[in-house]
Amino acid sequence: MDRPELGLQQLHAFTVLAAELHFGRAAERLGIAQPPLSQQIRRLETRVGHPLFTRGPGGVGLTPAGQELLPAARRALDGIADGLDAARRTGSGEVGRLRIGFSASLALTVLPGLLRAHREQYPGVELELRELTTAPQLVALREQAIDVGLLREPPAGADAPGLATATVLTEELVAVLPAAHPLAARRAVPVAGLADDPFVLLPREAGPTVHERILRLCREEGFEPRLGQRAVEWQTVAALVGAGLGVSIAPAGIRRIRIGGVAYRRLEAGPARAAPGTVVAAAWRRDDPGPLVARFLRLAGVRPE
């Protein structure tokens, strides 16, 4: 034999009546007439198989079965309320887990302030950080291993397939020199002055676009940079320059890396040309601008479509 379904309305009506012990007052508190309240209670008693309330000249009281059900009913209603609140907060991006990929050099510029602002505004969101260069970040986004990326110089076509990018900031490029280098005595260095030095650079596969930007900058000044050493991270680039293994051109944030024997100098802009710079961008999946990602992007100054 089928048993009547147990509904949240019945449990709510039961707990209110148990608190008021008066059908009229309970119905008024629930905002319904007394007959529908009586029907809710009868359905619940049918489901339980025993009376939950005594009804008589002395008023309404809880039966032993009602006394047993009351704490469980309150826990169930509280659990539903907590679940609904958690779902609302998750849906609005107030809680959850956000997986962020970032290029290591951004830990020297935009990343710390962005993370601090996010923690202050959304303390219920757990941040999972993954240090990745540009190309691996794009792969991780497509494979849904991260939710949003902060990368340097997204390559042309990074928006496809399925990805969107937007500029967060443009950062100046600087010369990275051994402290004993003759040009280290100058406040600004001409790019052409580095033509005879070996270069320490990130490999192309780590950041194709920034790699090509540096090469193009040198070519515009009439020389092809001679590769001396490769390094995957800008911190390593600075260390190798400090060891006297060459010079480099790098984002200005590298100046925060304090390594003995290294000098950072501005690059002189060529005639009728702005000072060389590099783009920092945010990247995300076009089909996944959920609230966690959207709120992070807005803090970075980006408004997803």
Image (cartoon, helix red, strand yellow):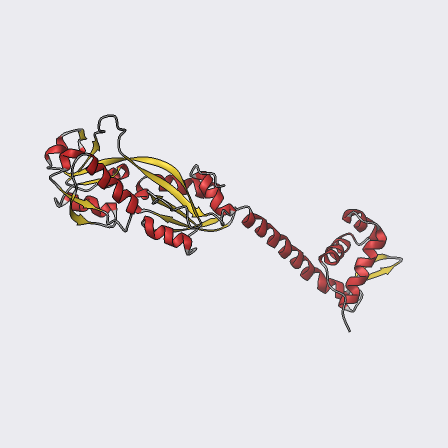
x, y percent for residue 263:
17, 36
Q: Residue furthest right?
A: 57
Which of the pair 94/198 is nearer the observer? 198
Question: What residue do we see at 23% from left, 37% from top?
Answer: 217
Q: Quadrant of residue 155?
A: top left
Residue 10 in the figure: left or right of residue 142:
right
Residue 46 in the figure: left or right of residue 159:
right
Q: Could you tell me if residue 3 is visible in this image?
A: yes
Q: Residue furthest top?
A: 272
Q: Quadrant of residue 296?
A: top left
x, y percent for residue 92:
55, 46
Question: What residue do we see at 49% from left, 49% from top?
Answer: 287
- Quarter holding the N terminus is bottom right
Which of the pair 159/89 is nearer the observer? 159
Question: What residue do we see at 56% from left, 49% from top?
Answer: 91
x, y percent for residue 38:
83, 57
Which of the pair 225/111 is nearer the observer? 225
| Vertical placement of residue 301 versus 3, above or below | above
Which of the pair 80/18 is nearer the observer? 80
Residue 11 in the figure: left or right of residue 177:
right
Q: Could you tell me if residue 123 is visible in this image?
A: no
Count of numbered tags: 0
x, y percent for residue 142:
41, 54
| Vertical placement of residue 50 versus 107, above or below | below
| Vertical placement of residue 231 versus 113, above or below | below
